[in-house]
Amino acid sequence: MRFPIKTAIAVLLLGTGVYFGYTPAKEAYEKYTKPKFREVEVSRGPIVAVVDATGTVQPVLSVTVGAFVSGPIEKLYVDFNDEVKKDQLLAKIDPRLYEANVARDRATLATQKAGVERAKAQLQQAINDEKRSQALRKE
């Protein structure tokens, strides 16, 4: 009989300790997590509103913008969500890449023209050599 009495006393003491330990902890937790409010007198003034919310904003009108060429942007004339008008310049693409391509193509054209002139000169040289050979045969 002694064993169950000791166990009952131990459980009772343990339960009392938990109760007296849990109650102040619960009250402290509720005190620090309770929402805090400020009370002020109502008066007229500017409206200041801060909304902390999550979600998505949908545009009224969405337009896809594209360009005929691509490349790095040199200058940006508008910012995100700026209102733009028809034919308004939005950005300037860096022209150096395209200018280099034009210069390369002009150099290639000049090289090909020089090749044509060289071929014409070789043709004229061959014609002259043939005429000279025919003249030497007749003699």
Image (cartoon, helix red, strand yellow):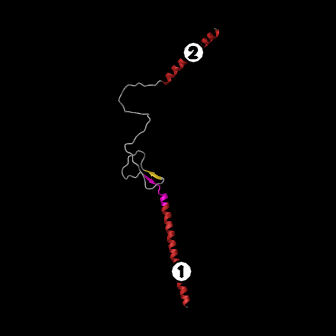
115 w.r.t. 8: above or below: below
Residue 100 image position (x, y, % from top left): 50, 60
| Mark 2 secondary-structure assignment | helix
96 w.r.t. 13: above or below: below
16 w.r.t. 65: above or below: above
Q: Residue furthest front?
A: 1
User: Magenta residues?
Assistant: 91-99
> Would you name the residue on which mark 2 appears?
15
Mark 2: give few (<14), some (14-19) or many (20+) Cα within 10 Å. Answer: few
Residue 1 image position (x, y, % from top left): 63, 8
Give the residue displayed 57% in from the left and 15% down from the top: 15
> Would you name the residue on which mark 1 appears?
126
| Mark 1 secondary-structure assignment | helix
Residue 93 image position (x, y, % from top left): 45, 54
65 w.r.t. 119: above or below: above
Seen in the image, is 15 located left or right of residue 85?
A: right
Residue 97 inside the magenta-drawn segment:
yes
User: Which residue occupies the foreground of this view, 108 or 2?
Assistant: 2
Residue 9 inside the magenta-drawn segment:
no
Give the residue displayed 53% in from the left and 80% down from the top: 126
Residue 113 image position (x, y, % from top left): 49, 71
Give the residue displayed 52% in from the left and 75% down from the top: 119
Q: Residue furthest right?
A: 2
Q: Residue furthest left?
A: 44
Give the residue displayed 47% in from the left and 57% down from the top: 95
How many numbered dots are placed on residues in this image?
2
Q: Are marks 2 and 1 in contact (CB under 8 Å)?
A: no
Seen in the image, is 6 located left or right of residue 25?
A: right
User: Which residue occupies the foreground of this view, 41 or 110?
Assistant: 110
What type is the residue that disc 1 sits on? Ala
What type is the residue that disc 2 sits on? Gly
Badge 2 or badge 1: first in the primary sequence: 2
